[in-house]
Structure formats: structure tokens, C-alpha cells
Image (spheres, rainbow, N blue to C red):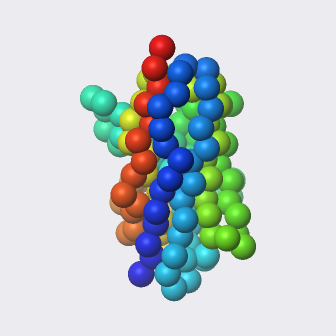
């Protein structure tokens, strides 16, 4: 069982930055694959930063060059650095985790473990 807790959301003006954190706890949580998803108004949940199953990371086209995912393996914390935020980035951001063999499930949005989400609001 893995528990995920996101933090770092908030309200910022367009052009601002936020860093989201996702703390993972539970057995073998350090070995799990992790990703960031978001649910924006009027749209389906989308993967913001997800692992490629053959290595590396994929970013949603709308966030490329602005968002960066990273992980502190010692602290078991996943980060999402978000720069140059836009109003269309407004939404609920979720951290997800899956066992190493479940990369495709994770990328497809069917991860076994999800956090409660953290709200990001970007104003003009």
C-alpha cells in the first residue's frame, strides 16, 4: 500500500511559478513509478509529466519547456516545478504511483495509487 500526499498548490498570477510536492509513504514506495496528472475545468484528466516505459519522461505539449518533474529518492518526494504559469493551467493536480510493471497503466491514467490532489489557480 502506498500513500501519496500532494502539497504546494495555490493561487498565482500568470507568469508566476509554483512547485508542487508529492510525499510518498508505504512499503516499497521508493520503487514505484510516479507521475503528475491534472484535471482542468471542462477537460478530461491528462498526464502532465509521465514516465516513458523505455526511459525518460513525457510532458504534455502544453507544458513543455515550462514544467519539470524531479524526484528526491532519499526523501521519497516527487516534485513538479511549474514556471511561466498560464490561466489554462488552472486545475487540480494529482500525483499517481504504480508498481514498476504497471508503466502503461500509469501513463494511461489508471494508476493504482493517487493522492488527494492540490489546487492550482492562475489568474490574469
- Please tell me which residue lies in front, 35 or 116: 116
The image quadrant that residue 29 belongs to is: bottom right
Question: In the shown orientation, is residue 65 left or right of residue 10?
Answer: right
Instruction: Note whether 63 is above or below 4 in the view shown.
Output: above
Residue at the farthest left position: 42
- Residue 97, x across and y down, in percent: 48, 65
Which quadrant would the N terminus be assigned to in this image?
Answer: bottom left
Residue at the farthest front position: 11
Q: Is residue 92 visible?
A: yes
- Residue 14, x across and y down, in percent: 55, 19
Which residue is painted at 44% across and 72% down in the image?
3
Which residue is painted at 64% across and 49% down in the image?
69
- Residue 113, x across and y down, in percent: 40, 68
Which residue is painted at 50% across and 53% down in the image?
7
Residue at the farthest bottom position: 27
Instruction: Note whether 65 is above or below 71 in the view shown.
Output: above
Question: In the shown orientation, is residue 69 left or right of residue 102?
Answer: right
Which residue is painted at 52% across and 28% down in the image?
12
Instruction: Note whether 94 is above or below 100 in the view shown.
Output: above
- Please tell me which residue lies in front, 116 or 107: 116
Q: Is residue 53 visible?
A: no
Q: How many marks?
A: 0
Amino acid at each position: 500500500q502506498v500513500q501519496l500526499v500532494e502539497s504546494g498548490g495555490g493561487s498565482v498570477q500568470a507568469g508566476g511559478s509554483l512547485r508542487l510536492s508529492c510525499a510518498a509513504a508505504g512499503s516499497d514506495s521508493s520503487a514505484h513509478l510516479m507521475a503528475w496528472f491534472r484535471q482542468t475545468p471542462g477537460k478530461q484528466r491528462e498526464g502532465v509529466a509521465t514516465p516513458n516505459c523505455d526511459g525518460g519522461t513525457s510532458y504534455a505539449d502544453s507544458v513543455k519547456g515550462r514544467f519539470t518533474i524531479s524526484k528526491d529518492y532519499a526523501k521519497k518526494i516527487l516534485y513538479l516545478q511549474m514556471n511561466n504559469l498560464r490561466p489554462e493551467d488552472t486545475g487540480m493536480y494529482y500525483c499517481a504511483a504504480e508498481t514498476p510493471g504497471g508503466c502503461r497503466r500509469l501513463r494511461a491514467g489508471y494508476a493504482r495509487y493517487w493522492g488527494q490532489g492540490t489546487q492550482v489557480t492562475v489568474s490574469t
